[in-house]
Amino acid sequence: MTDRVLIQTEHLTIEGRSRAGHETWFRVRELGVALDIGRCPDEIIAVPNVFITHAHLDHAAGIPFYAGQRRLQRLESGRIWLPEEAADDLRQLMTIHERMEGTDYHIEIIGMAPGDTARVDRKHAVRAHAATHRVPARAWEFLELRHHLKPAFAGFDGATLAARRRAGEVVHDEVEYPILFYTGDTDRGILEQNEALFRAEVLMIECSFVGDQHHERAAMYRHIHFDDIAEFAWRFENQLVVLTHFSRRYSRQEIRDTIRRRCPRSLIDRIRIAIPE
Ligand SMILES: [Zn+2]
Ligand SMILES: [Zn+2]
């Protein structure tokens, strides 16, 4: 049985697999990105940009395999984005793998601090956010870069605009549209401290625990309990909220029933559960 899920949103196709302590990875085709890598399933090998939220093995174990497979398949070097605190350790780990295997791996390792923004491709940028967890962790906000004509050029025809651009004038403003926010592992601190997550078109947020007796456990291991999300229900402006990283102690049915019981009406229709039917 596979545990893979496929969630279609208005603009994104999200595929992946996510269970706490076991494995978490997602691929978002339209953005050309992977969110965490789990143990590196075949689907991720060809993805050029991989965003690791933190170094826990259920999220990051697949990095060396990704590098090795890309080399075997003669793909250009992939880019691993991760918390800056973990970047040097990963470089050393890759050096050890190279030594053990007598080979060179070409992956680009990009450490990001909270607040850092970088271009991912021609149309997209990423912003790193602090995530509250047991080890340094980043949440990733993906921004679509849209070009809006500057008001001063409103009504100009195409030929005129093209001429102005050739002459070196900037006729467009670049506007950032937050298309996806992925929290990775975190606790309710991110709901208390972060504004951006409530505004992205699609929010993917961890929800490790749903059970009545598991509030303390969630706090102790720095994870989110569904009641934390319910408490903030009125703040979510997102089109969809995808819940990820459920503990394996719960069946899909149990998760669905519990959420239906506890979720305020204003949010329930926008919730998706990242476990297949
Ligand atoms: Zn995890
Ligand atoms: Zn973790």
Image (cartoon, helix red, strand yellow):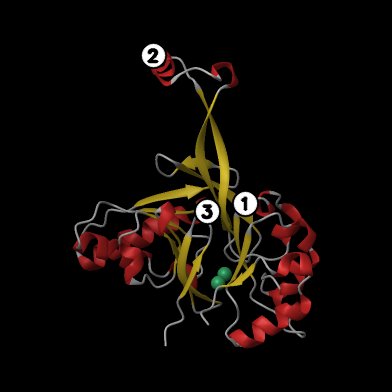
Farthest residue to the top: give it. Answer: 167
What number is the disc on residue 200? 1
Amino acid type, mark 1: Ala
Whole-angstrom CA distance, mark 1 to mark 2, is 36 Å
Task: Give residue 160's quadrant in the image.
Answer: top left
Q: Is residue 133 visible?
A: yes
Q: Look at the picture and state if 168 lies above or below 133.
A: above
Amino acid type, mark 2: Ala
What number is the disc on residue 163? 2
Residue 253 placement, left or right of 35: right
Mark sitting earlier along the chain (3/2): 3
What number is the disc on residue 10? none
Amino acid type, mark 3: Glu
Foreground of the two, 37 or 165: 165
Mark sitting earlier along the chain (1/3): 3
Residue 89 picture location, percent across and down: 44, 58
Foreground of the two, 234 or 231: 234
Mark 2 C-beta to ligand 1 under 8 Å? no
User: Circle 3 sits on which residue?
Assistant: 85
Q: Is residue 250 visible?
A: no
Quadrant for ligand 2 reads: bottom right
Residue at x 42% of width, y 21% of height: 158
Mark 1 crowd level (few <14, some 14–19, many ≥20, 10 Å Cα): many
Residue 206 picture location, percent across and down: 62, 68
Mark sitting earlier along the chain (1/2): 2
Q: Look at the picture and state if 213 lies above or below 109.
A: below
Do tag 1 and tag 2 residues touch (Cβ < 8 Å)?
Answer: no
Whole-angstrom CA distance, mark 1 to mark 3, is 26 Å
Mark 3 crowd level (few <14, some 14–19, many ≥20, 10 Å Cα): some
Query: Marks 1 and 3: which is nearer the front?
Result: 1
Residue 44 picture location, percent across and down: 36, 65
Mark 2 crowd level (few <14, some 14–19, many ≥20, 10 Å Cα): few
